[in-house]
Amino acid sequence: MVDVDFEDMAICPVQQAGGVELKTAMSRTPVPISAELADELAASIEKFGGEYVVTDGVRGRSSTWAIERAVRAAKRRLPDLPDGFRSTIFGATSRRC
């Protein structure tokens, strides 16, 4: 796990889904995360281990469609999410910065 920087509280994408290289320098920009999200990610890593932060529950990489489906379900349950809330940051497979 090289894409989550717990010290600087950021996710640093290194490739797109499917192992495709990121297309722009901007897409390599670290994404700041909250302390709460950092705690959740750390707990997930401890529970599931493996190479990926977002897993299928058995240490494999989660599929993009599964993440999109979960985000759509969350949006239905949490109507106060901002309009710009999207799962596009999860479309990039990241490793710690």
Image: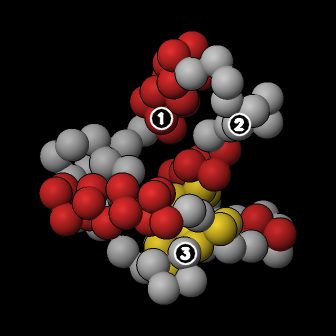
Q: Is residue 93 left or right of residue 2?
A: right
Amino acid type shown at disc 1: Ile
**Is residue 26 found left or right of 55 in the rendered image?**
right
Decide: is 19 above or below 7.
Answer: above
- Dot 3 or dot 2: first in sequence order is 3
Between tags 1 and 2, which lies in front? 2
Mark 3–mark 2 Cα distance, whole angstroms, equals 19 Å
Q: Residue extending furthest top?
A: 76
Q: How many marks?
A: 3
Closer to viewer: mark 3 or mark 1: 3
Q: Secondary structure at mark 3?
A: loop
Quadrant location of residue 83? Answer: top right
- Asked if the residue at tag 2 contacts the one at tag 3, i.e. Cβ–Cβ closer than 8 Å, the answer is no
Task: Look at mark 2 in the image and give the residue it sits on.
Answer: 85
The residue drawn where x is 57% and y is 69% is 11
Which percent across, then down, holds residue 76? Answer: 57, 14
Q: Amino acid at mark 3?
A: Met
Q: In the image, is residue 79 above or below residue 22?
A: above
Tell whether 57 sits left or right of 80: left
Q: Say which mark, if any, is on residue 67.
A: 1
In this rendering, the answer to whether 76 lies above or below 15 is above
The residue carrying mark 3 is 9
Instruction: Return the x and y of residue 49 as percentages of the image width and height.
Output: 19, 64
Q: Amino acid at mark 2?
A: Phe
Mark 3 packing: few (<14 Cα in 10 Å), some, or many (20+)? some
| Depth order, front residue of 61/33 | 33
Residue 20 placement (x, y as % from top left):
60, 60
Q: Mark 1 touching mark 2, by CB under 8 A? A: no
Quadrant that contains the N terminus: bottom left
